[in-house]
Image: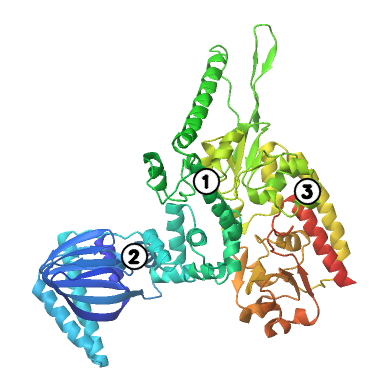
Amino acid sequence: MNLNDHILLWNHVFIKILDVRKNSLAPGERIRNYLLPASAYLYMVDGTAVVGMDQQRYIVEGFHIVHGGKLANVNIKTDSGLVYYMILYKAILALPCRMDIQHLMENERPFQDQYSLIPTNPLVMYQYIRTLEGEWEQSTKLAKLHAKTLFHQWVYALLSDLYGQSIQPYKPDVVTRAIEYMSKHLHEPVALDVMAKELECSAGHISRLFKQKMNISPIQYLGQRRVERAAHLLIYTGATLQQIAEQVGYPDAHSLSRSFKKIKGCSPIRYKKNQNRGQKEQKYASGVNHDQDLPGFTREIALQPLYPQLYNDIDYQYHKVDGGELFMQGKFNMTALTMMLCLSLLLGACSSPSQSTSGSQSETKPTAVQTSNSKTEEGKSSVQAETRTVSTIRGDVVISANPQRVASDQYMGYLLKLGVIPVGVRTFMLNEAWIEKSGIPADVISGIEDLGGEFPMNLEKLVALEPDLIIGSIDKNIEDYEKIATTVFLPYWEGESTSGPLAKLRRISEVFGKEKEAEEWISSYEQKVEEAKKQIAGVVKEGETVSIVQVANKSLYVLAAEGGNYGSSTIYEMLKLPPTEQALNMEEGFVNISLEVLPEYMGDHIFVYGSWDEGANEVLNSEVWKLLPAVQKGQVYPYGSFGDKGDEFVMEDPFSLELQLDTIVNIMVEAKE
């Protein structure tokens, strides 16, 4: 920002002096990683030093002023010794004021700027700050007022120097500061508004900048960091799930498990078993004995991390290490596959007929299906493969009109309902609870390749399957998939919410040109829903409301009217049971609450998911729970269980929706009788 805007803000802010102190460092003494608790001026009056502030370095000698904002990381190194003053202050915008002033304060944040200067009149500045320190140390109100007056005189002289020396402040990166803050407070509850307050900006400002730079919201990033840390602790320590949850900022094991499953694609326990098994297989295959001297190629492998980064572009080359020759074989196989693919494309290009230069040029139209034909010399028609253009949030993707080998990291139930049998999916989907009740032949499920329990899918296995289409549900995995085959990105989770299950089915049907099949199932399902509404009529009377809670591991979650999971779409969106005002106003798909505020969220009827699971009794046997009007009237409907495998309420595919509808209706009909 320009200096005039800076001065403008100084004329509109209220200044609160937090501390004034004089410090000294002996020769060779250092200050390491000191986070400024507020905006600060450092006035060096004697000695030389190197002052580091975040990524900036200032060499100071004699009189020198350095300014930094709250949470700036300060490091000072001196060989000769150093004497300096520090003024900690906070600038608060005085309201009401013009919108342009508020905009400047929010977006420019000059009191967070970093800069250094040698004052034009160093002794005048020295006299100001020395007197200021003396007044600050007195306890009288008049002395504090004088201290504030002296500080404004200090600032006036400093701004004059800034203007005269044409110094351009360095603006610290808010996103970097936010990441550092989250890393430091990973083991604590971190609320976006609290973090914004610490960084002296609004939550909306942080979110906008974070999404621009990281393509993800701050809370999503924090969740990923916590799960990655939890995964590390699972593998390399013997800590319990509850201990790990507390270490990475979750109130309990259930909260961690929920986030872990969403991000990693499997439960923490299953993840640990899979990783331990993979480690044992790797050691057995490589024949590595760490107690002996290792040959050259084995030492190279041994120096690699046990678990390379999940999203490494060439991660699939290192899944199995069988010794020097087989270690290179992974690379050779990938190279061979790439060469074969390139050769196929080249031959195809050479054999295709050249474009005619006569006649009018064909017009390209954004149609769903484009077909091209060519005739052989004998006059026989040879039809080339049809293609379909699919619109995604990452742009248009041209795919085969009738893909035969589909791999997907989500959506198996949706695909099967549309008659698309995938060649490979993640482990979790092959164990979904609805499969046993779906009527799908066991040999169909057994014929689907297990592509691992994590995101992204096992890339080595994925290459071997030679898919002609990959469905990816997490943005950061798409580039990995695109290196293997044509990929369509269909996000499953959007923040902490999920789009409606019928909307998901329609999205997937558009990819395969099966809109008709999707609408036929939706029409049939909606008829069942209407029949179900008649069966449960009168259970929830006019004017009454419905709440859905999850209880397990001593935790409470209230599900939102939109974007929730675990049966909320069936209860709220399909059966149209009336939600509470709180459920309607939730920004995300759920909210984690304490037992004390439970009555504020509860309606006249309560559906309880997980009431038979471990830890649920802590809630269900509490006095707060027992005093709820719905509980006293017997208008509570327990259903579902987290368990090891979960049940039909974990997913929202058509098979699960059909089972959910039957379960909820049966519970309510029994209550009605």
Label of residue 284 in the image: 1
Per the model, the C-alpha gap separating discs 2 and 3 is: 52 Å
Compared to residue 140, the image places residue 239 above or below, namely above
Q: Which of the image's four quarters has the N terminus?
A: bottom left
Q: Residue at x 68, y 83 (%)?
A: 624
In the displayed structure, does residue 190 sit left or right of residue 418? left
The residue that label 2 is drawn on is 109
Disc on the earlier residue, 2 or 3: 2
Label of residue 522 in the image: 3
Disc on the earlier residue, 2 or 1: 2
> Helix or strand or loop: what does disc 1 sit on?
helix
Taking depth in this image into account, of 476 and 367 the one nearest to the observer is 476
Label of residue 242 in the image: none
Say which amino acid is labelled 1. Tyr
Q: Residue at x 73, y 43 (%)?
A: 445
Per the model, the C-alpha gap separating discs 3 and 1 is: 50 Å
Say which amino acid is labelled 2. Arg
* Residue 51: quarter of image: bottom left
Q: Which of the image's four quarters has the C terminus?
A: bottom right
Residue 19 x/y as whole percent: 27, 81
> Helix or strand or loop: what does disc 3 sit on?
helix
Point out the frontmost of discs 2 and 1: 1
> Helix or strand or loop: what does disc 2 sit on?
loop
Contact (Cβ within 8 Å) of mark 3 with mark 1: no
In the displayed structure, does residue 10 sit left or right of residue 286? left
Point out the frontmost of discs 3 and 1: 1
Residue 7, visible in the rendered structure: no
